[in-house]
Amino acid sequence: MAKPMTIEEKMYLIRYKADKKSHLTILDHQECLINCDDKICTIFCPGEVYKWEGDASRMFVGYEACHECGSCRIGCPNDNIKWEYPKGGHGIVFRLA
Amino acid sequence: MPEQYDVIVVGAGPGGTACAYKCAENGLNVLLIERGEYPGSKNVMGGILYRKQTEEIIPEFWKDAPLERTVVEQRFWLLDKESMVSMGYKSKEWGQEPFNNFTVLRAHFDPWFAKKAVEKGVTLINETVVLDCILENGKVVGVRTDRPDGDLYANVVVLADGVNSLLAKSLGFHKEFKPDEVALTAMEVLNMPKGKINDRFGLEGNEGCSVEIFGDGTKGELGTAFLYTNKDSINIGVGTTLSGMIRSKIKPYELLEYVKNHPMIRPYIEGGEPVEYLAHLIPEGGFHSIPKLVGNGVLVIGDAAQLVNAIHREGSNMAMASGKMASEAIVKAKAKNDFSEAALDSYRTSIYDSFIGQDLKKYKDLTHTFENNPQYMNEYIPLMNKAANTFFSIDGTTKWEKQAAIMKSFTEGRGKLGVAKDIYKAWKVMK
């Protein structure tokens, strides 16, 4: 069996034109800390945008790698993610499929 | 005096562009707004484009459009851990005009399609996000964009802004979709020389093959994996309902790696060079999830209207057809100079009377039935593999004994009544 590709390796295949400002906002970091045990957005996000930083009790949002799929907005059990489109022309740029 | 159009279409995917094209062809003044750098740069689909609905927008488009391959074979694999039951249909007729469907790469096809609309007179602006619809006295009269002085006005605004239609939601046409109404799909494009693809899939020249994969590819969750052949690349992807991903705590890219390394799949893609990784949501709520489609001065089409038939991987064709139907309603409304909800309502009836409404109605309970009854994916598909194994293994056992063993294996877990119920349930949602 071939060694599985990591998400980091996959991300090298993608063209991004990141804005300076995040289009994804955690509305309340306390909500993630207190009312969300499995931090599911850190699992299902296809771009691994969300990372839980336990020491800081904070959800880190690497919006630059966002595929703009919308899963986090729909899948957050606490409706705690404000989801907007990146500024026109910014964000991910698919070149093929 | 602000800029005034007959029609503003939000989103230059297949649906939006089809609508803009047909409106312009009928003499309307159309603005098509795309948030990406170019049409297709924000869009993902597995890669199957059906001929019929595309042809109804642009006759004989295949003579000019950037298509990949002409699909002559559709395969279905029912996958277990180390085996599969395989079915399919191959036809030389599909390789000849007028063709059945094609593989395409969206970032190649969509800009071409939008260019055709521009040739018809559509004004296309890229790199522009529509933030809001502008309302006056309960009627949509235009859109607010993220450009400076970016308000634009029109008699009709068409929302073709895809699965994440924040605009339709903001108008109250639907609530936020739930995780079981959308499917999260991750895919990759793997470069591979044309000759190698033809050898592996048994193809000649520019013939293509599509493979839909059920069962172990999604680790028993409701969903499919797929393999589509392009000219000199392969699209491989896998998706399940978002609720399935959440329930089983699957990382989509790890599931994709699982599929790529599956012993039944790996030999087809071995040596392929990954060149792009993509993810997207597919609106798979079906009939029950279709939002309000028409308002005063506004129509919703394509993915934004949840017009996807997941069972038959139809989406872009429904988007194009809905775009065309929207254009017909708009042209009629323009003739009467009445853009009220009542005047535009023929779009809604067209959708529900057409193959789109009828097909989605046919399968209206299918997704939820399969979602709530995981045995179809994670019990019956392995059982079918075991049955095939028993049947095709020559080991001195009589065929009577084999059949009895197969029947027993099917009823062992769920009981005879349970199996009968499952068959009835499946028949009911498919009939």
Image (cartoon, rainbow, N blue to C red):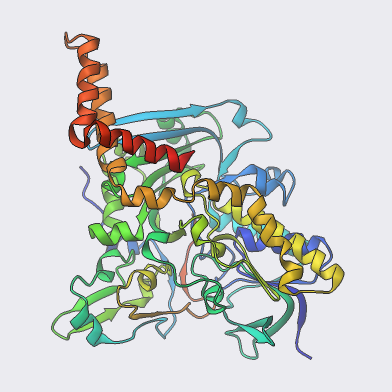
Q: Can residue B276 be seen in this view?
A: yes
Residues B414 and B62: in front is: B414
- When the figure is inspected, residue B1 is found, relative to residue B261, above or below; the finding is below
Residues B70 and B51: in front is: B51
Q: Is residue B250 visible?
A: no
**In the visual, does B44 lie left or right of B119?**
left
* Residue B197, x across and y down, in percent: 44, 35
Q: Quadrant of the N terminus of chain A?
A: top left
**In the visual, does B361 lie left or right of A52?**
right
* Residue B257, x across and y down, in percent: 28, 50
At a point 20% along the width and 8% down the height, the residue shown is: B398
Which residue extends farthest front?
B417
**In the visual, does B392 lie left or right of B169?**
left
Q: In which quarter of the image is residue B266?
A: top left
Q: In which quarter of the image is residue B131?
A: bottom right
Q: How many marks?
A: 0
- When the figure is inspected, residue B115 is found, relative to residue B193, above or below; the finding is below
* Residue A24, x across and y down, in percent: 38, 80
